[in-house]
Structure formats: C-alpha cells, structure tokens
Image (tube, rainbow, N blue to C red):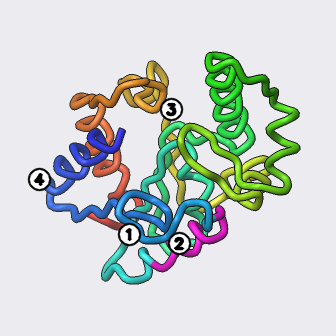
Amino acid sequence: MRRTLVLAMRALAAQGFAAVLPDLPGQNESLVPLVDVDLNRWQKAVAEIVAEIGGPVIVAAFRGGALIDHEAKAAGWWRLAPVGGASLLRTLMRSRVSADRETGLTSSLESLQTEAKTAPLLLAGNRLCPAMVAQLGVSEAQAVEPLRNVGLGADGIAGTPLWLRAEPGEDAAMAEAIAADIAAWSATCGIS
C-alpha cells in the first residue's frame, strides 16, 4: 500500500501538487516505540504536520487513517474506503487467533480483549498498548467539511485492497486514479 501511495504522490507532483507521507510516532523511521502510541497521539501528530505546511492542504486518508485526520486544519479531507476502529481491531484480532491456532496456541477474541485491558497486545506484528486497543474499539471517522469519501471498486477508485495482501505489492492504475480524483476534487476546495 505504501508503494501505491508513493506512486499516487508522484502522479500528483506531475500535476503540480506537493505531497507528504509522514512517519507518525511509532511508524517506520520514528524513534518512538509503537507500544507508546495511541490514537490521540497520532491525531495530534497529523494536526502538527499539517500546521507546518504552508498553503492550503488536502488531507488524504486511507482506511483507518480516517480515524486520525480530523484535528488537522485543512482546506478539505479526502478519504478512501474509510473504516471504523472496531472493524480494524476485529480483523487484527481474528488474524492473531488464526496465527495462534497455527502455532498450537489457544486464544479467542474474548481472551485477547481481556489481555489488552492490562498489557500490550501483539497484533499483526505490532505491539499495541491498552489505550490504543481501547480507542480502536470505539473509534469512528469524525465528520469534517468539505469531505469526499471514495469507495474502492465499482463504486469508486478501481483497484485491489492492497492492505489485505500477505505479500507487498503495488497497483499503479489505482495510484493514478487516486491522484486524478484528488486533483479533480481539490478544485472544489479552492486548490488548483
């Protein structure tokens, strides 16, 4: 997915737009351990990053990114296939239950939820603190204006759900479609 986002950013740059794909606390090159991060920290980080950018900004969020984009002061928000935190958390926990089963361990959604109340929980290779798990369990994308919600597939951007792939990949056509949609919609927000 990250590679496809970079391709979309390059396509936007070719149309004269600047784009930023920041490493939030606990991600990629960040020196902060993920276990020390919760959704509130990410929301503040996104707001701070946007505040440092000169000129009007469109915040583009993908899937769970829509849970942390609303505190930013932006000219507009563009969201691809936004999803609630509870749905993300269930998917992560189901993956953990399946992985545990394959290694001979016994776990359940209920046992993982109980464990997450008092200790960090390892989900999909990421150690999440109790606050992050609790916040994900109740978090929904917040209303912002102006907003463009775009689906994936027949009702929106053509492409595959890269976040479901076991192996990394990219979708160049999807990246072009993302860039074209953001560029076209940005004019409605006074950005061209």
Q: What's the CA distance linking mark 3 and mark 4?
A: 24 Å
Which quadrant of the rendered structure holds the N terminus? top left
Task: Tell me the kind of residue under disc 3.
Answer: Gly
Residue denoted by label 1: 57
For marks 2 and 1, the one nearer the N-term is 1
Label 4 residue SS: helix
Query: Cβ–Cβ below 8 Å for labels 3 and 4?
Result: no
For marks 4 and 1, the one nearer the N-term is 4
* Picture coordinates of residue 97, whole percent (x, y): 71, 25
On the image, which quarter does residue 105 sit in? Answer: top right
* Picture coordinates of residue 62, whole percent (x, y): 48, 45
Q: What's the CA distance linking mark 2 and mark 1?
A: 9 Å
Q: Main secondary structure of the magenta part?
A: helix
Label 3 residue SS: strand
Task: Tell me the kind of residue under disc 4.
Answer: Ala
Residue denoted by label 3: 151
Residue extending farthest to the front is 104
Q: Label 4 crowding class (10 Å Cα cut-off): few <14, some 14-19, many 20+?
A: few
Q: What's the CA distance linking mark 3 and mark 2?
A: 22 Å
Task: Tell me the kind of residue under disc 1.
Answer: Val
